[in-house]
Amino acid sequence: MLIGAAVIFLAVLAISALAILRPAVVASFGARRTILWGGLIVPTVILTILVIAAFALGERLLATPREEMPLRIDVTARQWNWEFRYPGGESTANKVRIPVGEDVDFALTSEDVIHGFWIPRLGGKLDAIPGHTNVIRLRADRPGTYGGVCAEYCGTGHAVMPFTVEAVSREEFYSVPAQSAELRP
Ligand SMILES: [Cu+2]
């Protein structure tokens, strides 16, 4: 998207410069042709490409059922912390560890008010709603520490409920107990 936007931006700048420096060249193109190409054909082609790309990428982000379901981590939000429960049954608070290069389903719910689960560098955000489970599928392509926040104002402690995501190699995630001591609440 960035590359596409940069190309379009440069093209518009070039045409603007041409219109200022060589107005006769631009005028010779004609009003009808300018509207047809600039207002119809070019935008239609660009928007079609963007819509197809967005649908293809968006499909991957949806937590749709698969033959082999991704790792599922249950997340409970409350005023004011996050609890992460792994398939093994153990849990951590305000820190979650995930394997690199693997889709992870975060199943979100809340014990009190609506909170917003958001790890900006990994993707979109989703609400954690009391009495309901929302699933968001995310993946870390590189190992490292990613910051997460509550993105829905949830009371006076809202600002103090950030959390961290440790993305580690698959070997480490599955060999070392996922809920190692330093991650315990
Ligand atoms: Cu919150």
Image (cartoon, grey):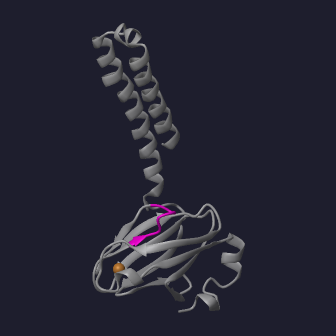
Q: Which residues are magenta?
A: 117-123
Is 59 or 48 nearer to us in this picture?
48
Q: Image check: 127 left or right of 53?
A: left
Rendering coords of residue 133 (x, y %): 35, 74
Q: Number of marks in the image?
A: 0
Residue at 53% x, 82% y is 95
Residue 78, located in which quarter of the rendered image?
bottom left
Rendering coords of residue 181 (x, y %): 63, 92
Q: Image check: 162 left or right of 71?
A: left
Rendering coords of residue 57 (x, y %): 47, 49
Q: Residue furthest front?
A: 21
Q: Image check: 33 left or right of 121?
A: left
Rendering coords of residue 159 (x, y %): 38, 80
**In terms of secondary structure, what is the magenta stretch mainly?**
loop
Is 25 or 35 nearer to us in this picture?
25
Q: Is residue 106 above or below residue 26?
A: below
Q: Is residue 49 above or below residue 115?
A: above
Residue at 51% x, 63% y is 122
Q: Is residue 19 above or below residue 96?
A: above
Residue 178, located in which quarter of the rendered image?
bottom right
Ligand 1: image quarter: bottom left
Residue at 41% x, 82% y is 161
Is 15 or 106 nearer to us in this picture?
15
120 within the magenta span = yes
Residue at 61% x, 60% y is 141
34 within the magenta span = no
